[in-house]
Amino acid sequence: MSILFPDQIAQAKKYCASLTEYKRRLTRVVNIGDTPMGGLHPIRVQSMTTVDTMDTKGSVEQAIRMIDAGCEYVRITAPSMKEAQNLANIKKELRARGYKTPLVADIHFTPNAAEVAARIVEKVRVNPGNYADKKKFATLEYTDSEYEQELERIRIAFSPLVAICKEHGTAMRIGTNHGSLSDRIMSRYGDTPLGMVESALEFVRICEDLHYYDMVISMKSSNTQVMVQAYRLLVQKLDEYGHIPYPLHLGVTEAGEAEDGRIKSAVGIGTLLEDGLGDTVRVSLTEDPEFEMPVGRKLVSRYEHRADHKPIKPVSTLPIDPFEYNKRKSKEIRNFGGQNVPRVVADLSQLENIEYKDLKAIGLHYFELTDKWNMSDLGCDYIYSGQNEISFMLPSGTREILDAAVWMKSPERKTKFPLFPDSSAYFHATEKSEELNLIRITYKDLSDEFYERIRKDSTAVLVIDTNNTHAMAALRRIFFYLMENKVENPVVVLRKFEDMDDESLLLCASTDIGGLLIDGMGDGILLSTELVPRKDKEELLQKAKMLNDTAFGILQAARTRITKTEYISCPSCGRTLFDLQETTAMIRQRTDHLKGVKIGIMGCIVNGPGEMADADFGYVGVGKDKIALYRGKEVVKRAVPAANALDELIDLIKEHGMWIEPQIVNS
Ligand code: SF4
């Protein structure tokens, strides 16, 4: 086995077995009913019911739908004693119907409910931010001795649960959420990945002192950068402090719905899975929970044979900080790199005779009557047309990229740009653009001569590609080579996929590219259609639209380019006070033009305000047909009738100067 991190950074920055060789982190096996987690067991897929826990029949039937869809642990909320007690009825009925899937009680704020549930179900989840703390959102200063007293208070409140879990063989998840850290943790560490890690470790230490080790840990956030950094830091701290390698439960909280929710989940969860972290995943979508299972399954199934990948040369230096976002330094070439947002290159190269109307699929609307273009927020920056040169003028914000051989014959060489197939073709070319040359490269192109020539080139943008099945790591290795050799030319990440269903493609692309963007690497995305079998024009345009939207979705999910309103909506559970899917759709319909505004849509007041973390505005259920509206973490309207709540939310957005009128586009 190779040494994968140099000695000087081995302790401080090491968070996985290897950055270049796929290897799952070997964790302790935790027995949860008859479905063990960790060790060499498969990465488990799980979810949570959304019906009221007091509705035994409804809970059982939903759990069965989830299990039939592949759910391996069913989590059920237990907000108070009565729900905790009803878990016994749910479990009895499920077992009577022949379902042995372990149940997990989800606990916030209520130790007495946890102590009841731990005697009934196979696992309890506690949130260290609120198990024995009421969130006050107060900035409190703690002296060392006050801090110790607080820890002692937690120990007294938490120890009985640990004793019950030990006695009944019940497992436990210490589930930290970025949005619900205790005031104590906030006062010392702030709202940071380190704070999240310390929040969990306080509880882990208590468990270990009591010789209880059947723990799973999670570090969830709706911010994928924070989430990834927190999990990595957790692993590093567990190792540094000599703790047992507990299994990790991966999840992005309140990921949202539809494509955006899937992309965001893949960016967060997939990035960690790529480095061998994670023993179970929960994809939180604002959809019925059974729809989460196929997504989770697709995310984890990529790793079943991953260890067979072609070798990638181990790293000898680590040019990034895995615990902090830093954009790779790159020089500005045209509008790539430097301070520019990452660019989206839409691939229309399989489309012959490209017409005005075709470009609508990639966000460029042409109005014949007025001879004007309208670019949507998802309008691509570049069109790669390959050998099919476009015969008309594009809107001023968009430029065409042609295969170099075609570009050399084009009369429009000043306004269009060439893509060279490899570095050799580029270095030997008789004609190049004076402004921007794109060069497709793989690992094989890299050499001292290559670095030397590219480093001095102020027109070359690299388009990196790999055929390695461990693609994210292989592409990351190319970035590391470039960084080690001080090549600061912008880099576009190219990914191409065999024909697969749209959802799989979206998840694979989000994982492979998101994993790079999270670490600040990537000045552009090109989702290539070159492996997509030739189809009719309509199908090709649909694919182009899907890939273009996905590229923007990945950039948004990795927080590197914001083009849409962001909805941080909870997946709903037995506490939910309104129909989350319907409400999210309704809010979205009126606000989805508010680029960059973050709106939290939360089903209950118990966890909602904490979970929506850094949302600009919040829409939170407080009672039957009653909504509380938030500006940041502050409640500004307490019990608005549901019928008026959306209008009042819009008024609130207006009051804070973040509203713009929607633009009507007639096509
Ligand atoms: S915020 Fe949503 S998912 Fe979380 S506890 Fe409340 S209703 Fe359930």
Image (cartoon, grey):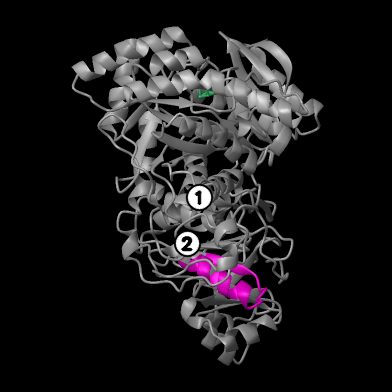
Bounds of the magenta segment: 474-493
Q: Nearer the viewer, residue 479 or 256?
A: 479
Q: Is residue 534 visible?
A: yes
- Label 1 C-beta lies within 8 Å of the nearest ligand 1 atom: no
Label 2 vs label 1, nearer the camera: 1
Q: Which mark identifies residue 619?
A: none
Secondary element type, mark 1:
helix
Residue on which the image places disc 1: 239
Reply yes or no: does residue 488 show up in magenta. Answer: yes
Residue at 38% over, 23% down:
165
Q: Quadrant of residue 384?
A: bottom right
Amino acid carrying label 2: it is: Met
CA separation in Å, label 2 and label 1: 25 Å
Rendered position, 443 above or below 377: below
Classify the position of the C terminus by image quarter. top right
Residue on which the image places disc 2: 472
Q: Nearer the viewer, residue 521 or 359?
A: 521
522 to the left or right of 39: right
Q: Is residue 131 visible?
A: no
How crowded pointer 2 is (Cα within 10 Å; few <14, some 14-19, many 20+) is rated as many
229 to the left or right of 573: right
Rendered position, 591 above or below 475: above
Residue at 47% over, 71% down:
314
Reply yes or no: does residue 344 show up in magenta. Answer: no
Q: Nearer the viewer, residue 421 or 216?
A: 216
Q: Nearer the viewer, residue 444 or 375?
A: 444
- Label 2 C-beta lies within 8 Å of the nearest ligand 1 atom: no
Amino acid carrying label 1: it is: Asp
Do tag 2 and tag 1 residues touch (Cβ < 8 Å)?
Answer: no
Residue 301: x percent and y percent?
33, 50
Residue at 46% over, 18% down:
160
Rendered position, 328 above or below 444: above
